[in-house]
Image (cartoon, rainbow, N blue to C red):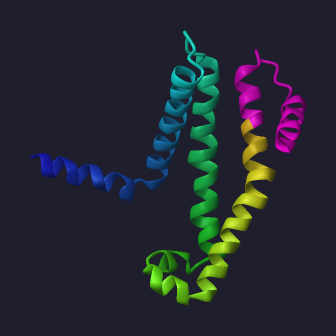
């Protein structure tokens, strides 16, 4: 019986990758904020509005947008990435084209996607959730620009 349940649980991400990704992203992002508030900042009371901002970001951006970016878009841009990832380290070291593709993925992700999409959307999501019905997205982006320089 336990094996059967485990077998079914292991199939969920395979059968429903998008929904699974959204669920995991929402949960882990919310939980990470709860850990920070509880153990790092040692808050006596959880700031649930802030946690909702993190959970919303996890749901919409990390679960949805990044899935679209990393699975279909990067999949088309770098069609040999999965076969490169499956290779042994020894074979990866011989695969110069695979290494260049990997470096290109990292560059696009870290130097294009994160500064131009990920962080601006995070700051705007936080502003939307934490403002009392009157978000100032210009202020959110200004805060991002200041923090980016730190």
In the image, residue 130 lies in the stretch drawn in magenta = yes
In the image, residue 92 lies in the stretch drawn in magenta = no
| Magenta-colored span | 123-150
On the rendered structure, is 71 left or right of 83?
A: right
On the rendered structure, is 27 left or right of 144?
A: left
Q: Residue at x 88, y 40 (%)?
A: 145
Q: Residue at x 56, y 17 (%)?
A: 42
In the rendered image, which quarter is residue 148 located in? top right
- Name the residue at the top extreme: 44
| Viewer-proximal residue among 77 and 86 | 86
Q: Main secondary structure of the magenta part?
A: helix
Quarter of the image with the C terminus is top right
| Viewer-proximal residue among 9 and 31 | 31
Is 85 placed above or below 34 here?
A: below
How far across and how far down the image is residue 114, in percent?
A: 73, 52
Q: Residue at x 60, y 16 (%)?
A: 47
- Name the residue at the left extreme: 1
How far across and how far down the image is residue 82, in percent?
A: 50, 75
How far across and how far down the image is residue 29, in percent?
A: 54, 36
How far across and how far down the image is residue 64, in percent?
A: 59, 48
On the rendered structure, is 58 left or right of 149?
A: left
| Viewer-proximal residue among 149 and 59 | 149
Q: Residue at x 49, y 31 (%)?
A: 31
């Amino acid at each position: 019986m336990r094996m059967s349940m485990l077998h079914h649980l292991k199939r969920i991400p395979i059968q429903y990758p998008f929904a699974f990704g959204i669920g995991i992203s929402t949960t882990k992002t919310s939980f990470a904020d709860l850990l920070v508030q509880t153990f790092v900042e040692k808050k006596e009371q959880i700031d649930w509005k802030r946690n909702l901002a993190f959970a919303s970001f996890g749901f919409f951006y990390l679960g949805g947008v990044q899935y679209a970016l990393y699975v279909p878009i990067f999949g088309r841009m770098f069609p040999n990435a999965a076969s490169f990832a499956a290779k042994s380290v020894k074979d990866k070291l011989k695969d110069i084209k695979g290494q260049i593709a990997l470096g290109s993925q990292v560059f696009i992700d870290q130097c294009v996607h994160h500064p131009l999409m990920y962080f601006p959307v995070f700051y705007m999501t936080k502003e939307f959730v934490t403002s009392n019905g009157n978000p100032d997205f210009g202020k959110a982006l200004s805060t991002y620009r200041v923090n980016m320089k730190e």
